[in-house]
Amino acid sequence: MFKYKFALKDHMKIHTDDRPFKCGVCDKMFKHKCALKVHMKIHTDDKPFKCEVCDKKFKRKCALQTHIMIHIDDKPFKCEVCGKLFKHKCALNTHFMIHTGKKPYKCEVCSKMFRESGTLMTHRKIHTGDKPFKCEICNQFFRHRSTLKIHMSIHTGDKPFKCEICYKMFTQRDNLKSHVLIHTGAKPFKCAICKKTFRLMVSLKKHTRIHSFQK
């Protein structure tokens, strides 16, 4: 069924050899006006379909879709400084700022500078207090999606962070980092009063209470 008479008339052309739309350049005939419009791009320099990877332009969408297959798993854009490869030119441009130290995105509140606009947007939530990411289990809100993902491991019991020395698993990366200090013997947290060092920040905090009682 067709809602409008013109839609039915247009559809009926499928079942006939009627091709009323003629190309003024090569005289090729078409059933539909839209098909003629697509065809006309052959005769012009108009290439409206652009590849987002290499910026190459195409006259037809199907030609672009075929071309894109070249870039699957392809990383044609190389950083001339470190040799790292990228799929997209914009990704290379962003990466290159690591070498130049350029940080074009500035927070209007605290003037902190950022390499990427996305990082700036995430940072702004510190000032607004915005916590858009909600845990559907306990209804707790988080500022960052990554923090929510880490939090979810509490409910799932998932322990994705593994110690490469003893293979112990942890729910959070910070817990793994603290654990690794057991193997290395490192004690990075130093008491400012007596210079005693500790493996964990919590141990240092506990220790500093001794000095507060001594006063």
Image (cartoon, rainbow, N blue to C red):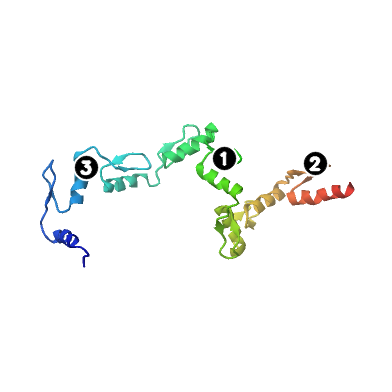
Q: Position of residue 213 (x, y in %)?
A: 87, 50
Q: Position of residue 41 (x, y in %)?
A: 22, 42
Q: Position of residue 95 (x, y in %)?
A: 49, 38
Identify the amino acid type marked 2: Ala
Mark closest to the chain's N terminus, 2 or 1: 1
Query: Which of the two discs, 2 and 1, sits closer to the camera?
Result: 1
Position of residue 47 relative to residue 203, above or below, is above
Q: Which mark is residue 108?
A: 1
Which element type, helix, strand or loop, lies under badge 1?
loop
Mark closest to the chain's N terminus, 1 or 3: 3
> Disc 3 marks which residue?
41
Residue sitting nearer the eye, 53 or 142:
142
- At 10% from the left and 56% from the top, the residue drawn is 18
Side of 68 where 131 appears, left or right: right
In 3D space, how far apart are the residues under numbered discs 3 and 2 (Cα atoms)? 74 Å
Side of 28 where 194 appears, left or right: right
Residue sitting nearer the eye, 60 or 11:
11
